[in-house]
Image (cartoon, rainbow, N blue to C red):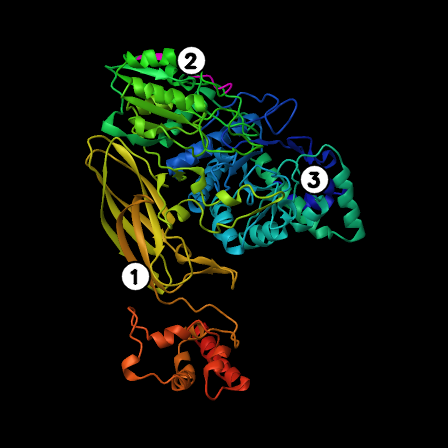
Amino acid sequence: MTNVQKLVEQMTLEEKAGMLSGSGFWNLKGVQRLGIPPVMITDGPHGLRKQNTAGDHLALHEAVKAVCYPAACATACSFDRDLLYGLGRALGEECQAEDVSVILGPGANIKRSPLCGRNFEYFSEDPYLASEMAAAHIQGVQSQNVGTSLKHYAMNNQETRRLTVSANADERTLREIYLASFEGAVKKGKPWTVMCSYNRVNGTYASENELLLRTILKDEWGFDGYTMTDWGACNDHVAGVLAGMDLEMPSKTTQNDQKLVAAVQSGRVPMAVVDEAVTRILTIVYRYLDNHRADAAFDLRAGHAAARRIAADCMVLLKNEDDILPLCRDEKIAFIGKYAKTPRYQGGGSSHINPSDITGAMDAVPAGADVRYAQGFDDAEDAVDPRLVAEAVALAKDCDTAVVFAGLSPASESEGFDRRHMRMPQNQIHLIEEIAKANPRTVVVLHNGSAIELPWIGKVKAVLETYLGGQAVGGAAADVLFGTVNPSGKLAETFPLRLEDNPSYLNFPGDGDAVSYREGVYVGYRYYDSVKADVRFPFGFGLSYTTFAYQNLRIDDAAFATGGPLTVSADIRNTGKRAGKEVVQLYVASRHEGIRRPVHELKGFDKVALAAGETKTVTFTLSRRDFAYFDTGIHDWYAENGRYEIQIGASSRDIRLTGTVDITDSKPLIRAFTRNSTIGDLLQVSGAQEELQPLMDALQRSFPVPEKKKPAKKEDGDDLFTKMFQEMPLRGMNSFLDKPYTEEELDAILRRIEALYRRETSV
């Protein structure tokens, strides 16, 4: 293996500075004198976008032919870590064949609003699901000794003013939602590189945010690869290097290299900081070079077949009234809509792949099936074409079943801009409604990268969500429609009834160069379920051609009671007549008075394949972290004492099994003990009741109450007199005493309670 440390020792300051910026659009600099070759990195995340000639980050120039796999909006719906690992492995093999050292992706940003133009590149509204999918993707790619670049770190949740906007959130929201999706991916997936976002985070550009880059990512999470900027995200290269940004991309001049050299020579930047960054970069460069297979090859046809299998396992059956699906091959079937022949299969921007092949649903009609086609609409502009509609309606009337392939047009969602609404093009809505009038057996197949409004859903029998399913999406859709594959996808995001229902609605995309995340931790189902809002489809929802029973919940808390893991298991039985896969979801809900939290949070999931009549046991292991919230007082995770409910379900709104577990041994949070401490907080300390009792007795003597008018007990048994004063600061009690305590006397009480607290929390 190459001795990186020795190479760094031999490099000049100018050569070191050069290593911290790119060479052109897709390459890192080499050092010819020392035999360090340049290496290539290129776009992903769901396919290889390698540009051999002119380079750009918006797919303006053509890339080599590659397999376009389903985008993250689709793959997250698989809830299948093995599937993501396999997809990643295939990408890694393709990178080896094309001599690419790092592929840029996956994207682990949270879907804060359905309007984010880049939602199709991101996994979920839930940080746990996003982190698990990202980690599996990363592990798959890197199993082939090719690196990934986890992106966009952090809080890149909109495209509007993305290069200048400051995404502002409190520490708890940042940690529990927007960093959590990256934390799990870093710790479990161990990406070779991490890419910063364009935006500012609480006022500081992500490219020079020391809290994010060094304190949290490198020191706290243990990230040992190199950090890089998104393309053009560098605001101040010298400040970025000081903050922990290792590589600026892209770079066509040496201007920033010279600035860094001058900063080192002036003493502003320690040489040790530069050496660390160079070491990180070269370690990853040689991790690839020392394991590169010069004879590596990739079979594009095999990749296309894999893309079809992956896409089929991601599709979500949203509606299937009267079991109209799967389609019967003996019937006359109409495939209507442009996307039946030329499917919408990927989004626009830097992830746009030059596909090696494209399969539309009409290309994949199984042998013996009588399927006829009508275009129905054109997506070049949103205008109803009466001729196309009339042709489609006539065909629908002449067939037993009509299947409309619709969704969002390529111009509707892309990197670089946000959507302005959740509506489908009006010409497609019109077509669906006209077809539903003509044929009561109408099915809709959707191609879109994010949640949309479905005003026509009550008029059709079935809906299949394919998202942006990659170059083989048509074949996968046909496999599901005709029953070759039993659908098993579950929604990785909530479908609200309308945009105004989304918790970020009033604060997206912000005002000018600032956006406030005022909804806090109440993102996606955490909000909808907490306020019991009606939604079109809940998080985790998806139908199957078979049915499943959930039975025999078991909670083993023997080790948990002493700080160890909690083991939860349940039996899942296929109660239908055909094989299928079920995504079993585990949520944790707080069932005690304490910090305000969402009604429940996803903490586990497993996808289980079952033959008809078969039963399997699924098992989950939870840690204390799974019951914790991020406390801004201690700047750490904290699991409160109290009762928690374990929920096992088929979606966030379909909980099938519940049980409880208690946490009783969490140490009280460290707080400052002052005269402004509330009586209720002080009473949380064991022994504080005895210290405060004389004061409480004096208070009651100051307010003599006739026996017959004494307040009753509350339902929980607390004395109303005590309850009323629990939120009063200690100093406030003096205002009601006939003989007030002196400040010295109050401070003495506080010191004694603090001593009790220290004794209680000492280890």
Measure how far apart labels 2 and 3 are at the Cα level. Answer: 60 Å
x and y, in percent, of residue 362 in the image: 37, 15
Viewport quadrant of the C terminus: bottom left
Label at residue 386: 2
Residue at mark 3 = 19
Secondary structure at numbered mark 3: helix
- Residue 228 visible (yes or no): yes
Which amino acid, mark 3?
Met
Which amino acid, mark 1?
Ala
Callout 1: few (<14), some (14-19), or many (20+) C-alpha neighbours within 10 Å? few
Span of residues in magenta: 371-381
Secondary structure at numbered mark 1: loop
Measure how far apart labels 2 and 1 are at the Cα level. Answer: 69 Å
x and y, in percent, of residue 722 in the image: 37, 76
Residue at mark 1 = 558
Label at residue 689: none
Q: Earlier in the sequence, mark 2 or mark 3?
A: 3
x and y, in percent, of residue 449 in the image: 46, 31
Whether residue 125 is in magenta: the answer is: no
Look at 30% across and 79% down and name the residue there.
710
Which of 662/620 is in front? Answer: 662
Q: Earlier in the sequence, mark 2 or mark 1?
A: 2
